[in-house]
Image (tube, helix red, strand yellow):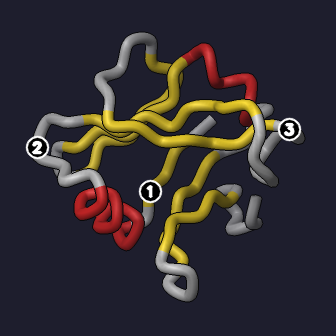
């Protein structure tokens, strides 16, 4: 599994979470919601320090990551996080650009 964050998504995270150098953003699985990778579950995000990394991506001294306990959710697929300007929010896609 790979994790990629677009520059526009990075800017959204930085503004939305008021991120500063050295901080981290976790993508984690929650029960409920719609779409994404597994039926009945969805992704949530939190500003939190990592404990047991499965995959991470550092951009401008900010770490984005998924914990090992949530790795099952992606079913060996890559996660690409982009920013949707039409909806003014982030969106999750396969690395190929396929929306989830």
Of labels 3 and 2, earlier in sequence is 2
Local packing at callout 1 (Cα closer than 10 Å; few below 14, some 14-19, many 20+) is: many
Q: Which residue is the site of mark 3?
A: 40
Of labels 2 and 1, earlier in sequence is 1
Helix, strand or loop at label 2? It is loop
Mark 1 and mark 3: Cα distance apart in space = 24 Å
Residue sitting at 30 percent across and 38 percent down?
Answer: 63
Mark 3 and mark 2: Cα distance apart in space = 34 Å
Local packing at callout 2 (Cα closer than 10 Å; few below 14, some 14-19, many 20+) is: few
Q: Where does the image place residue 30, in percent across and percent down from the top left?
A: 66, 32
Using residue 53 as the reference point, say whether residue 79 is left or right of it: right
Taking depth in this image into account, of 13 and 62 the one nearest to the observer is: 13
Q: Which residue is the site of mark 2?
A: 21
All told, the count of numbered labels is 3
Assign the C terminus to one quadrant of the image. Answer: bottom right
Residue sitting at 59 percent across and 64 percent down?
Answer: 91
Q: Which residue is the site of mark 1?
A: 5
Helix, strand or loop at label 3? It is loop
């Amino acid at each position: 599994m790979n994790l990629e964050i677009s520059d526009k998504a990075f800017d959204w995270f930085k503004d939305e979470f008021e991120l500063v150098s050295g901080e981290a953003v976790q993508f984690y699985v929650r029960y409920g919601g719609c779409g994404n990778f597994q039926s009945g579950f969805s992704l949530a995000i939190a500003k939190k320090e990592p404990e047991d990394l499965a995959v991470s991506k550092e951009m401008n001294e900010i770490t984005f990551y998924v914990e090992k306990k949530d790795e099952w959710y992606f079913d060996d697929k890559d996660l690409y996080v982009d920013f949707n300007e039409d909806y003014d929010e982030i969106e999750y896609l396969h690395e190929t650009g396929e929306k989830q």
